[in-house]
Image (spheres, helix red, strand yellow):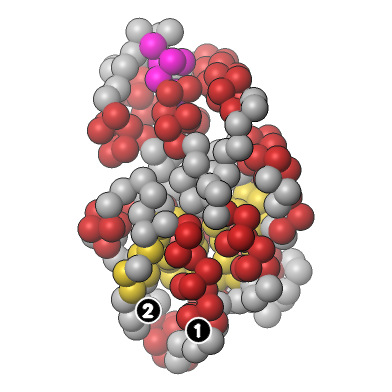
Amino acid sequence: MHHRSPPRNSTCVSLGICMIRALIFDFNGVLADDDPIHMEAFRETAKSEGLSFTDEEYLDRYLPLNDWDCFKTLFAAHGRPLAESKLDELIRRKSDHYFQTIADKAVLFSEAGTAVKAATLHCRLAIASGARAEEIRHILTQGGLEGCFSAIIAAEDVRFGKPHPEPFLRAHKKLKERDRSLRIPDCVAVEDSVGGIQSAHGAGMRCLAIAHSYSPARLWSASPEWVIDSIADFVSWLEKEVSK
């Protein structure tokens, strides 16, 4: 486990260490072990349009993005126009590839259920993800976690995806409907990418980064407050932080 203190959030510094009252999870690569599945579904759909990308390009450029922004960025990189109707078709085809692949698979990380259920004992929970809502809800239901989250912000719920802060700001807004006293500094984002960390910090939140998709060194380059090696380390991190 890797840990840094004090938190970078200036509001927390001025008020003393902020309590963690809400955790807002990214989904793909944090709770769901499906980043490689999304990459291959994106690749197959792109291939049908005569477009391609390397694994390194996917990690560097596409992984933090939602489906809409992935295809827009890919087409722009190849100098190809992309009409809105064509974009909708590509997203449907990519989603079909994705659901065909996960049909009979357990997609959640094996320790994700333990992590989420432990978190519910201490905090309100939300998801802020670039995945589509039907994908998120399908996997949560499959893993028996659908009732653990007070809010789910999916790709179709925002105008601007990560690294823009809108997904985390919307998640906070939804959580605040249940608890009017919940401040942004009381929320900690749980992410696995540099773009996700940037999104969380842009929203004014602290961030726990999990080194599932990138090395700890790569994640530290974006200055998260904490980095852990895997979701298996989450419960010990949480217990340490809430005991402060």
- Type of amino acid at the residue the image marks with label 2: Pro
Relative placement, left or right, of 10 versus 131 is: left
Snapshot quadrant of residue 1: bottom left
In this view, 139 is above or below 23: above
Circle 2 crowding by C-alpha within 10 Å: few under 14, some 14–19, many from 20: some
Residue drawn at (23%, 58%) of the image: 217
Circle 1 crowding by C-alpha within 10 Å: few under 14, some 14–19, many from 20: many
Q: CA distance from mark 1 to mark 2?
A: 9 Å
For label 2, the SS is loop
Residue 45 magenta-drawn? yes
Residue drawn at (68%, 73%) of the image: 121
Snapshot quadrant of residue 178: bottom right
Residue drawn at (40%, 20%) of the image: 43
Q: Earlier in the sequence, mark 1 or mark 2?
A: 2
Residue 204 visible here: no
Residue denoted by label 2: 7
Work out whether residue 110 or residue 52 is closer to the camera in this orientation and state it.
Answer: 110
Residue denoted by label 1: 18
State the extent of the magenta-drawn residues as a range: 42-47
